[in-house]
Amino acid sequence: MQTKEHIMYLLLECNGNMELVKTLLPGFLLPDAIRMYTRNREYSHFEADPKNPKEHSYMKFPVDLKNMTKESIEAGLKKDAYLVVHDPCVIGEETSLEVFLSTNKHLPENLKNGIYLHLSQDRQFDTFIRQVIDCSKRYDDIFINSNGEKMDGGQCRKYIGAVEDEIAGILALKVQKELGITCDQNWFDTVIGNMIRDAYPEELTENTCKYIKIHPDSENQLHNLGTIPRQKSMDRAIEFMLDDPEKAADAYKTAISIKQREQCDKESAFAKYEKQTGKVPITASDEPKQDGRGME
């Protein structure tokens, strides 16, 4: 799950309570942020061994986040950590919350709770992705998307990125509607950026913030609320994501199917119009834009 999605789900979890968000955020972002030092996702996400699911990678997270360095984290990995070595794959293995809790009893509650929430979200999102994409032959670099199309690892990564951008856009609208918070690029750069800056060393702050990028389409939706058509099935995918990822995947696939059918119907109508009139129909993208105050 992308960092921007993690944060917006955290906002919903905290019901917009920014003091609670600030308390949880340093630990909440740590499993992804610390990869700047560990490199391997398996350590900080407690991933299972694909050949022996009872074995897991693990690490002990530091308590003093502000003074983390590459050297201090590497020293910790040498002292008390374990890395499952397996063939590379764009899809991670299952995260174990139990292994995290058993190996990180030393953490204060705010860090432990933040990390736990992050890992819980990743577990659910990973389940969702495995329902949308057939990953059964992932170590052969073969993936099948929801349209039945075969992909390699690079194509799969791009496909997941597009899915996440779409989800993030709808999630941002949900946060704006329910909590009154506009999660645009400026908000992430300032509000969230300052929270990260207070908790992490400078180099880790910069590296963490550079991955929080909002798609231009999401920005446009946020600043023109109500002008973008919405699908109830896509909204249901967002609702179910953290509680029932399999149901979320079904809702997502329904939304994609509806979108594709609408696109086919539109293309057929355009072709029919052009054949009958000899004219190319004007689309919404060809018309002058409005911002609610008149013509631009």
Image (spheres, rainbow, N blue to C red):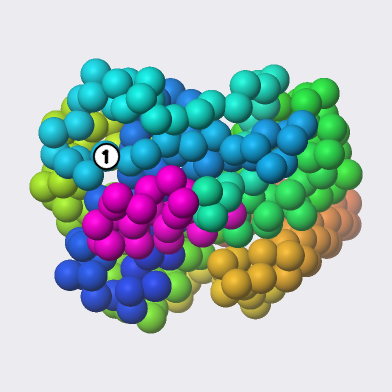
Residue 89 sits above or below residue 162 on the image: above
1 magenta-colored: no
Q: In the figure, residue 210 lies in which quadrant?
A: top left
Please give left or right for residue 39 compared with residue 20 in the image.
right
Magenta span = 100-123
Quick one: quadrant of the C terminus?
bottom left
Q: In the figure, residue 178 lies in which quadrant?
A: bottom left
Q: Foreground residue, 295 or 18?
A: 18
At 55% from the left edge and 34% from the top edge, which residue is drawn? 57
Task: Where is residue 23? Give x, y as percent.
Answer: 21, 62
Report which residue position mark 1 lands on: 62
Please give left or right for residue 64 compared with residue 154 in the image.
left
Q: The residue tagged with tag 1: helix, strand or loop?
A: loop
114 magenta-colored: yes
Decide if residue 103 is in sight here: yes
At 49% from the left edge and 37% from the top edge, which residue is drawn? 58
Q: Foreground residue, 218 or 70?
A: 70
Please give left or right for residue 236 compared with residue 98 in the image.
right
Q: Amino acid at mark 1?
A: Pro
Please give left or right for residue 213 compared with residue 40 in the image.
left
Q: Categorize mark 1 by other alpha carbons within 10 Å: few (<14), some (14-19), many (20+).
A: some
Residue 112 sits above or below residue 148 on the image: below
Decide if residue 225 is in sight here: no
Task: Where is residue 35? Give x, y as percent.
Answer: 39, 31
At 39% from the left edge and 78% from the top edge, which residue is drawn? 177
